[in-house]
Each structure stands twice: as C-alpha cells, then as structure tokens.
C-alpha cells in the first residue's frame, strides 16, 4: 500500500465548452514536493479542483493515496487538504473558531486538534490575532489562516493553488518552511505557482501543463536538458512557446 | 463631456447605478441589462400611467386639494416618505463609506474632493428618489397630458426631499464616525437606518393600541393630530404638502431649500467627508488581546455547524437588524391581541404563524443559501446530509425558542387552538426552511435584501407557503371552535391547507430545475 502514489490521474478530462483539461496523465509519489506550472488558462486550477472533489471530471480517473475518488470520496477527502488561491474564510469568525469548525468538519479528536491548532497559529505568527475577526485580516494573514485550516488534520496530501500570491517576504518564508517541514515528515505537496523561483527552489519535480495537457515533467535538470544552464524561466518559456 | 469634470463623474455614477440595479448577472455580460427585470418594470410603469390617467380624469382638476384635512394628510404621507428616504440614505451612506466600491480609485485620482463628494451625494439622492419617482412620476406625466400642471411639482418636491435626506444621512454618518469611531458607526447607522423606516409604521399603529384612557401618551398623540388639523394654511409646517399639491410659491421655496442644503453640505463638508473615508478605511483594525486562547474542539459535527452559523448571524448587526425588523412590524399585533379581554385567537394564531414563517424564510435563506465557504464544505469528508440537517436546525431552533413563551401561554389558555397554532407554527417554520433548502441558487449574504430578485421561483414558493400557513392558522380556531362555520371558512381552511402542504412537493420537484 505504501508504494501506491499520493496522486494518480489517468486520462483526466474536463471541458467548459472548450477543453480545460484534456486527457491528463499525472503521477505524484508519496513524500514528493511537486510543482505544477503553466500559463494562465492552462488547466492547473481545474485539475486541482477535480482532485479536491470540487469539480466532477468528464472522463478519466483520480486516485488519491490508492483510493478512487469517484468510489469513496469521503475516504479520499479525509486524507487530503486543498487550499485555493482565494482563501475560504468566514469574516465573522475568529481564527480559533475557524480552526474549531474545520477540525469539526474533518472529525478530528479534541486531544489531537488543540495542540495542533496552537502549534500552527504559533508557527504562522497568528497567535496574537486569535481574538480578532478574520474580516479585518490582510490577504497574507487570511492565506496563512487558511493554510492552518488545511493543515489541522495533518493531511497526507496537501494541494495548494498559488499559495504564495499576495504574501510578503516574511509570510512567504513562513509558508515555504511549513510546506518543506510537511514534506520532511513524509507528507506530499502539490502546488501551482506563477513564481518560478518557488518551484525552482522547493519542488523535487516540476510538471508543465498547457492546453490541459502535460507537455513536460521531471526534475529541474531533466527539464533543462535541451539547454543546460538555462533558468527554469527560460525553460518554461521555451516549452510553452511564450518566449 | 470633459473627462474629469463633475458632469463626467456624474455620468460614471449613473452608469454604476445602472450596472448595480439592472445589469445581467451572466459573467462576461455585465454591461448588458437584465431585460426581463427592465421589461417587467416598464410594463408596470405603463400600467401605472394608465391607472393614474383614469384616476385623474375622473377626479378632475379642482378636487379640493387645498382643504385643511387633505393638506394635513399629505403632510403625514410626506413625513413618512422622508423617514423612509432617510432610512435608505443612511444605508447608502454606510455603503459609500465602508463598502467603498470605487472610492479608493476616486480619492487617489487628482479629482477635487468637492466634485467627488457632490457626485456621490447626487448619486445617493437619485437612488433614494428613484423608487418614489417610479410610483409618483406617472402623476406628473399624466397631469401634463391632461393640462393639470400642478402634478409636475412631484419632481422638484421628491428631489428636494431626497437631497435633504441624503445630506442629512451623510452628515449623520460622518458625525458618528467622528464621535463613535468607524467600527461602531457601521453598526449604529445600519440599526438606525432600519429603525427609521419602521418608526413611522409603529407611530401610525400607536392609535390602535393606545386610547384616551391609556394616559398621557395617547392624549399627546390625539393633541398632535388636533394641532396639525388646526394649523394655519400658511404654516411653514405645511409647506412641503402645499408644494406637493402644486402651490408654485411653495414649490420654489422647497426646491431652493433642497438646492441650498446640498450646496452647503458639499461646500462645507467635503473635507469632513474625505477624513471620514480615511477613518472608515481603517475600520477593520482591531486591538490585539493578551487574553489566553481558548478552544472548543469537543463539539459534534452538528454542534460545530450550528454554533458557526449562529456566530456568523449574530456578529452581523446589519443582517440581524434586517431580520429582526420583521418582529418590529408585528409588535402592534401583539399589543392589540394581548390588551383585549376577549382573546383574539384567530389573530394570535395567524400572527404567530406569520412571524415564525417570515423569520424562518429569512434565517434559512441566510444559513442555507448564503454559505461563505462552500468549497470548504465540499472538500471536507463530513456528511453533506449531516451538515444540511445541522444548518436547517440552526435556522429553525432560534425561532422555536422565540415563540415558546407565547405558544405556551396560548396552550394553557386555549389548549385546542394552542395545539392547532403549534402545528401551523411548525408547518410555516419548516415549510419556509425546506423551500430554501431545496430550491434556489447559492448566494452571498450581501444579497439578502434583494434575494427575491435572484430567485423568483423560490421566493414565490416561500411566500405561498407563508401565506397559506398563516391563513390556515387564522381559520383553524374558527373551525375548531365548535360553533357551526360557513362554507367560506371551511373551504378557505381546506384551500389554505392544500396550498401549505402542496408547496413542499412542488419545491422538491423543482429543486434541480431551479438550481
């Protein structure tokens, strides 16, 4: 069972009038930090939303940690967390109340949830804002709280859509450290980002998607084999033909 | 039109008004009008013109409009209109200051703050006057057609009143920002706005629940009415009414007054407006607390969902004031019912049922349809059925708690009628909640006030259920009273029951189509 990948997508397709994801095959191993890159409208967010169970695929199969998402969505959801680019928060709740709610949705035992919540709020420097309503939070604070919510049930697979957008340097560092720590403890992270430097420095493997299809995949060195010494940006622009 | 000029900015404001009120909701077609709404409104407007035409032709030009009691009655109507306008203007000023919209862009531009404030005030006044113009402008148009030019006074009088209301509301809100601070102002202004609209209604009903033997309050009211009727025809207090009835001199004075107030407000307070906006933009900042952080992770899924929903509603004073306003409108009924010796069972039963159904419709819409984080619920492994049941409970439980005491009192006083009322209260409350659970599209809390425009099908079902249960509640005490009842009452009760119970399967059948 431990050899099963964290995520396996087979022939995944989704169309909104025109194909957004077109027969995508993708495998991410357990314990891997995987970055999914692509130009705007390439199908990254649609792919992640299908994996999170927010969109039903038109065709194809999604397996999360060996569980078929279509057959047992609850079991799959219990082991993953999804953080969209626009954080899903309740403005009239305090951070502590938000975490209580998320922990309730995932059915986490109080004995495990409380220390985890304290640890996450402390790590993300949100403890001093614990008594404030989130409606007054900056975008970065909201993003960090949403990340705390995503991590409270200690998911085996963490899926993040543009997690660093709008964060200042300090907050971005905190989030990156948290993600690396999650992978170091055996968790899997899949993220999309437009900040290529993030993918370059954090990801073990990078996938490039365009028109809903995976056009290249591999480690950074494997991707720039055609042009050794090139930056990821050069490689990305060359592969997607947007240079 | 010169870009950056006041007129150019006014055109932009009018365009935004159009987008906000009539734009289609489909993505990518924001600029297009919602022609169904516009067409329907135009149809009603033309029908109004026809009705007014028939009325004015039958009444004729000299209909004794200058008679004392008629002028007093028009004064009362104008006072009511002004209070409603003030209520709308207060809400609009809060939106301008706190929801901001394009304010950040405008304030960061090189446009003079006087122009920005003037245009915002004009936009508010236009928005406030629009509804009344819709209903009253046909009098002016038809009057012009029939040669009864006095009706043209409606335009200057309504605009002057709207300008006064907008100026007063903006000054009130800005003063509150100065005195109370931005956070408190938002809450207080919203509550005051809601109360201002209801105030005149309650005053108008005061006569129903106060009488001469009730002491000073009632006699003061009677004295006020008598004093108004004995006012001299030239009294300045009757000036707005005389203007509305077409007195040329009064129209000129009222229009000049409106213009003067607007000019002075803009000229003297535009800097105050900018400072208010700057203060309001920092309204979300909260002082940190050193109190220890406490968690409650020991609740069940249902309890977690219910507590979250109650917190979200309770912490939104604007929403609470809108929901509880319905209670305010039903207060006079309570006075009438409980002060009489002979218990008005039909009124108690009907009133309680309508109150519960109405509250349930509002709360269930907020809790079931206006979910702030639907993606979070969808990505969670929690059972959807459990979450929806918990939301349903969160919507209906506060209502049952609220009516428990009057219902208990009724059960003790008249057990049979009490049981019937208990059944209709449950029916109306659950009926409205289930209609909202099954039909309609997800929405945001901000759309609460205009929820009927979004989901006409769902709203119609909700209203049918509410009216049918209320009618059934009023008729049942008569049917169960033991005395023989006529066909009309028995048939009415049967029809009400059929509609009340029929709404639910209809809502169930329409659940996917409406969504």
Image (spheres, coloured by chain):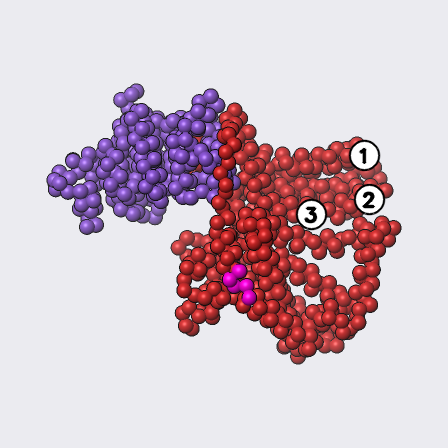
Chain colours: A purple, B red
Q: Considering depth in this image, is B200 or A75 the residue closer to the camera?
A: B200
Residue B264 visible in image: yes
Considering every residue shown, the one lying at the far right of the view is B213
Vertical order, B351 against B13 (above or below): above
Pinpoint the chain carrying mark 2. Answer: B
Q: Quadrant of the N terminus of chain B?
A: bottom left
Tag 2 and tag 3 share a subunit: yes
Instruction: Answer whether residue A125 is magenta in the image.
Output: no
Residue B62 falls in which quadrant of the image? bottom right
Mark nearer the N terminus (1 vs 2)? 2
> Does the magenta stretch mainly form a helix, a strand or a loop?
helix
Look at the image and give the residue range highlighted in magenta: B268-272
- Circle 2 residue: B339
Residue B91 visible in image: no
**Rendered image: mark on residue B413:** 1
Q: x, y percentage for residue B403?
A: 70, 37
- Circle 3 residue: B328
Residue at (32, 37) in percent of width and height: A173
Residue at (55, 66) in percent of width and height: B268
Vertical order, A88 against B171 (above or below): above
- In this rendering, the label closer to the viewer, 1 or 3: 3
User: Relative to B482, is A38 on the left or the right?
Assistant: left
Residue at mark 1 to residue at mark 2: CA–CA distance = 15 Å
**Rendered image: mark on residue B433:** none
Q: Considering depth in this image, is B146 or B251 the residue closer to the camera?
A: B251
Mark nearer the N terminus (1 vs 3)? 3
Pinpoint the chain carrying mark 1. Answer: B
Near mark 1 (Cα within 10 A), the count class, few <14, some 14-19 or many ≥20, is: few
Near mark 3 (Cα within 10 A), the count class, few <14, some 14-19 or many ≥20, is: some
């Amino acid at each position: 069972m431990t050899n099963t990948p964290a995520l396996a997508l087979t022939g995944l397709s989704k169309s909104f009038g025109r194909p957004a994801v077109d027969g995508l095959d993708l495998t991410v191993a357990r314990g891997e930090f995987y970055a999914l890159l692509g130009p705007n409208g390439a199908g990254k967010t649609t792919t992640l939303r299908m994996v999170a169970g927010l969109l039903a695929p038109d065709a194809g199969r999604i397996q999360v940690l060996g569980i078929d998402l279509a057959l047992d969505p609850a079991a799959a959801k219990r082991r993953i967390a999804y953080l969209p680019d626009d954080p899903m928060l309740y403005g009239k709740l305090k951070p502590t109340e938000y975490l209580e709610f998320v922990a309730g949705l995932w059915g986490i035992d109080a004995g495990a949830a409380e220390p985890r919540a304290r640890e996450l709020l402390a790590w993300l420097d949100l403890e001093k804002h614990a008594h404030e309503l989130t409606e007054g939070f900056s975008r970065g604070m909201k993003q960090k709280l949403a990340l705390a919510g995503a991590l409270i049930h200690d998911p085996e697979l963490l899926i993040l859509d543009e997690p660093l957008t709008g964060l200042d340097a300090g907050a971005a560092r905190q989030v990156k450290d948290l993600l690396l720590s999650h992978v170091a403890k055996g968790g899997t992270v899949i993220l999309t980002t437009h900040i290529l430097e993030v993918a370059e420095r954090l990801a073990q493997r990078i996938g490039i998607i365009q028109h809903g299809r995976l056009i290249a995949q591999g480690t950074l060195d494997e991707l720039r084999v055609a042009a050794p010494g090139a930056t990821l940006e050069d490689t990305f622009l060359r592969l997607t033909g947007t240079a | 039109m010169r870009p950056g000029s006041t007129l150019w900015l006014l055109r932009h404001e009018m365009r935004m008004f159009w987008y906000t009120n009539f734009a289609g909701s489909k993505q990518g077609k924001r600029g297009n009008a919602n022609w169904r709404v516009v067409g329907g409104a135009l149809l009603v407007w033309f029908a109004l013109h026809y009705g007014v035409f028939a009325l004015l032709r039958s009444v004729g030009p000299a209909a004794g409009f200058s008679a004392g009691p008629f002028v007093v009655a028009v004064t009362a109507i104008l006072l009511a209109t002004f209070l409603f306008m003030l209520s709308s203007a207060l809400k609009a000023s809060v939106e301008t200051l706190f929801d901001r919209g394009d304010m950040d862009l405008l304030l960061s531009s090189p446009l003079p703050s006087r122009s920005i404030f003037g245009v915002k005030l004009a936009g508010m006044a236009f928005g406030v006057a629009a509804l009344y113009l819709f209903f009253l402008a046909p009098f002016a148009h038809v009057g012009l057609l029939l040669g009864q030019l006095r009706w043209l006074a409606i335009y200057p009088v309504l605009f002057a009143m709207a300008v006064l209301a907008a100026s007063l509301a903006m000054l009130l809100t800005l003063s509150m920002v100065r005195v109370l601070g931005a956070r408190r102002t938002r809450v207080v202004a919203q509550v005051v706005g809601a109360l201002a609209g209801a105030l005149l209604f309650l005053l108008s009903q005061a006569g129903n629940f106060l009488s001469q033997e009730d002491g000073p309050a009632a006699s003061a009211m009677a004295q006020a009415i008598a004093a108004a009727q004995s006012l001299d025809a030239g009294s300045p207090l009757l000036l707005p009414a005389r203007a509305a009835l077409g007195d040329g001199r009064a129209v000129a004075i009222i229009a000049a007054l409106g213009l003067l107030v607007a000019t002075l407000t803009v000229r003297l307070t535009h800097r105050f407006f900018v400072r208010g906006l700057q203060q309001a933009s920092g309204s979300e900042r909260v002082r940190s607390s050193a109190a220890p952080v406490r968690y409650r992770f020991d609740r069940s899924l249902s309890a977690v969902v219910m507590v979250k929903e109650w917190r979200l509603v309770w912490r939104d004073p604007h929403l609470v004031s809108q929901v509880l306003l319905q209670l305010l409108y039903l207060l006079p009924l309570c006075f009438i019912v409980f002060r009489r010796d002979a218990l008005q069972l039909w009124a108690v039963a009907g009133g309680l049922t309508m109150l519960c159904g109405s509250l349930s419709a509002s709360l269930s819409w907020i809790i079931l349809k206006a979910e702030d984080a639907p993606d979070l619920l969808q990505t969670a492994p929690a059972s959807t059925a459990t979450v929806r049941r918990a939301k349903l409970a969160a919507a209906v439980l506060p209502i049952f708690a609220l009516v428990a005491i009057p219902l208990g009192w009724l059960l003790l006083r008249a057990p049979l009628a009490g049981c019937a009322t208990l059944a209709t209260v449950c029916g109306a409350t659950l009926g409205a909640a289930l209609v909202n659970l099954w039909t309609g599209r997800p929405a945001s809390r901000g759309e609460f006030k205009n929820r009927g425009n979004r989901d006409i099908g769902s709203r119609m079902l909700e209203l049918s259920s509410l009216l049918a249960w209320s009618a059934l509640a009023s008729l049942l005490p008569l049917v169960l009273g033991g005395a023989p009842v006529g066909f009309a009452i028995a048939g009415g009760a049967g029809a009400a029951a059929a509609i009340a119970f029929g709404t639910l399967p209809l809502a169930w059948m329409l659940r996917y189509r409406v969504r």
